[in-house]
Image (cartoon, rainbow, N blue to C red):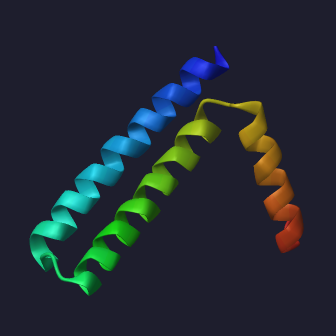
Amino acid sequence: MITARITIASALLAGASWLVWYAVDGVLGRSLPAQIASVGAAAGAGGLIYLRAVLRMRIPEARQVQRLVLAQLGRA
């Protein structure tokens, strides 16, 4: 069951990343700085979507990583 949840979260990551890349690429064009910006924005958006998805689906490893990160930031 966990594998199915991670697969769904990964599909959401891929879809969000592609949509953001496509939109930003269309606006900024194909120069190197534009590609850096569009790929960076796509990676950031995809990462946020994935993070939200795995936390909402209550994947145990995601909660564990969340606790570790918050502990390192001093907010646990």
The one of 75 and 40 positioned closer to us in this rendering: 40
Q: Quadrant of residue 13?
A: top left
The percent position of residue 76, horizontal first and vertical second, equals 88, 61
The one of 38 and 52 positioned closer to us in this rendering: 38
In this rendering, position of residue 60 left or right of residue 53:
right
Q: Is residue 14 above or below residue 4?
A: below
Q: Quadrant of residue 14?
A: top left
The percent position of residue 28, horizontal first and vertical second, equals 15, 78
The one of 22 and 63 positioned closer to us in this rendering: 22
Quadrant of the rendering where the N terminus is positioned: top right
For image coordinates 47% across by 27% down, the residue present is 8
In this rendering, position of residue 58 left or right of residue 48:
right
Q: Is residue 30 above or below residue 42?
A: below
Residue furthest top in the image: 1
The percent position of residue 16, horizontal first and vertical second, equals 33, 48
Residue furthest front in the image: 32
For image coordinates 40% across by 34% down, the residue present is 11
In this rendering, position of residue 1 left or right of residue 33:
right
The one of 31 and 43 positioned closer to us in this rendering: 31
For image coordinates 27% across by 75% down, the residue present is 35
